[in-house]
Image (cartoon, rainbow, N blue to C red):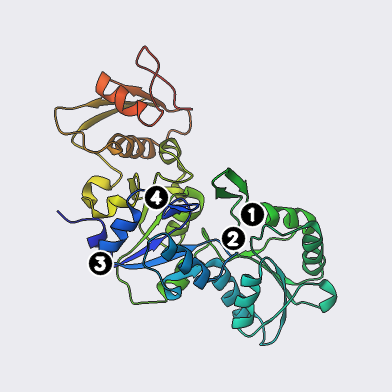
């Protein structure tokens, strides 16, 4: 058996929802990452903290991490600015001091006011961002300043639930200025490219919990991806994923890295038989081992993606084994054995 980790010399790991949730590691994450031999890079859209702060947080949770193991959207945003501006150019910061420090590190001058004549605006998440900050940025953008967003995540996971993310603040400026920013973080490919520049890798794998950032970012960068179910997106989301957001592998959490890669890939499975007829997918158990709890989801996702019939597809259980498997992921059909997955 070849494990998933053994097939990839670099793991590009999302953080919140993949490696940890708030102040708790996801199940088996610490133990699994301690034994895999692949190069581990933590790749995050969060621009509010510097790489050293992120690495410290990871170590507090039990992971092995140094600043060089962390790649942030703030770093990518700063690099994009440096590529387009002369040294010493003024950049208006909408975000934390950690974002401002990244701008300083690439030889640019961070400012906070439009009256300072900035030639660019860089925007990253900060819980302290207020109307006044957006007003300064809006004035600069309307005056022709280059605008780079560290990320456009609409929401931010927290232990209390989903909160407004940087993308929500970006949307406010987009509405106010009728402009579109350049984007550094996932799903734009810049962040992945910056991560891969830290080594000579042949077979990297992107791992994350969000289809619209992690998985879409992998596809944009032409990299294979693993979707884990310990964060934001669900089994139902995976089944209905648009082509630009479809993972190669699906697993519950990072413990899958030491599992059989063939069993984790989206596709047919000997334990399940799938029929597709005029928009209906019917799944039945065979007399073979059904595999892990997600095998039925991988089979259904494969069938739905290949059928390409659009959202009205109906998922039906052809027997009690299939019904119980679907119930595990809140996809159980109605009592008569049928049910639309809406």
Q: Earlier in the sequence, mark 2 or mark 3?
A: 3
Q: Please state which of residues 267 and 39 is positioned toward the viewer in this rendering.
A: 39
Q: Residue at x 52, y 69 (%)?
A: 53
Q: Nearer the viewer, mark 3 or mark 1?
A: 3
Q: CA distance from mark 2 to mark 3?
A: 30 Å
Please indicate whether residue 133 sits to the left or right of residue 25 in the image: right
Q: Which mark is residue 37?
A: 3
Q: CA distance from mark 2 to mark 4?
A: 23 Å
Helix, strand or loop at label 1? It is helix
Is there CB contact under 8 Å for labels 2 and 1? yes
Residue linked to disc 2? 151
Residue linked to disc 1? 167
Residue at the front extreme, as displayed: 60
Find residue 240 and report its horizontal and vertical position in percent: 45, 38
Q: CA distance from mark 4 to mark 1?
A: 25 Å
Residue linked to disc 4? 26
Q: Residues within 10 Å of mark 2 (few under 14, many from 20)?
A: many
Q: Residues within 10 Å of mark 3 (few under 14, many from 20)?
A: few
Q: Nearer the viewer, mark 2 or mark 4?
A: 4
Q: Earlier in the sequence, mark 4 or mark 1?
A: 4
């Amino acid at each position: 058996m070849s494990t998933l980790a053994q097939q990839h010399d670099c793991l590009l790991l999302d953080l919140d929802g993949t490696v940890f949730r708030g102040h708790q590691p996801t199940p088996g994450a610490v133990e699994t990452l301690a034994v895999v031999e692949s190069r581990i890079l933590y790749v995050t859209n969060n621009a509010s903290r510097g790489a050293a702060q992120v690495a410290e947080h990871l170590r507090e949770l039990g992971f092995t991490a140094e600043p060089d193991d962390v790649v942030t959207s703030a770093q990518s945003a700063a690099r994009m600015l440096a590529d387009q501006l002369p040294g010493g150019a003024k950049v208006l910061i909408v975000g934390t001091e950690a974002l401002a420090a990244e701008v300083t590190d690439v030889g640019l001058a961070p400012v906070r006011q439009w009256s300072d004549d900035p030639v660019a605006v860089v925007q990253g998440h900060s819980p302290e961002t207020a109307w006044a900050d957006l007003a300064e940025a809006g004035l600069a953008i309307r005056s022709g300043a280059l605008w780079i967003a560290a990320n456009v995540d609409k929401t931010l996971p927290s232990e209390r639930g989903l909160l407004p993310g940087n993308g929500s603040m970006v949307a406010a400026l987009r509405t106010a200025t009728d402009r579109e920013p350049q984007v550094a973080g996932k799903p734009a490919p810049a962040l992945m490219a910056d991560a891969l520049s830290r080594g000579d890798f042949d077979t990297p794998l992107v791992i994350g919990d969000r289809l619209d950032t992690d998985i879409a970012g992998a596809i944009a960068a032409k990299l294979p991806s693993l979707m884990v179910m310990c964060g934001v997106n669900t089994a139902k989301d995976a089944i209905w994923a648009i082509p630009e957001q479809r993972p190669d592998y699906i697993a519950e959490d990072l413990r899958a890295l030491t599992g059989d890669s063939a069993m984790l890939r989206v596709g047919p499975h000997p334990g399940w038989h799938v029929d597709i007829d005029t928009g209906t997918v019917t799944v039945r158990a065979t007399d073979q081992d059904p595999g892990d709890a997600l095998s039925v989801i991988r089979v259904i996702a494969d069938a739905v993606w290949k059928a390409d019939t659009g959202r009205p597809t109906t998922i039906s259980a052809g027997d009690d084994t299939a019904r119980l498997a679907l119930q595990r992921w809140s996809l159980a059909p109605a009592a008569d054995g049928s049910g639309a997955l809406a």
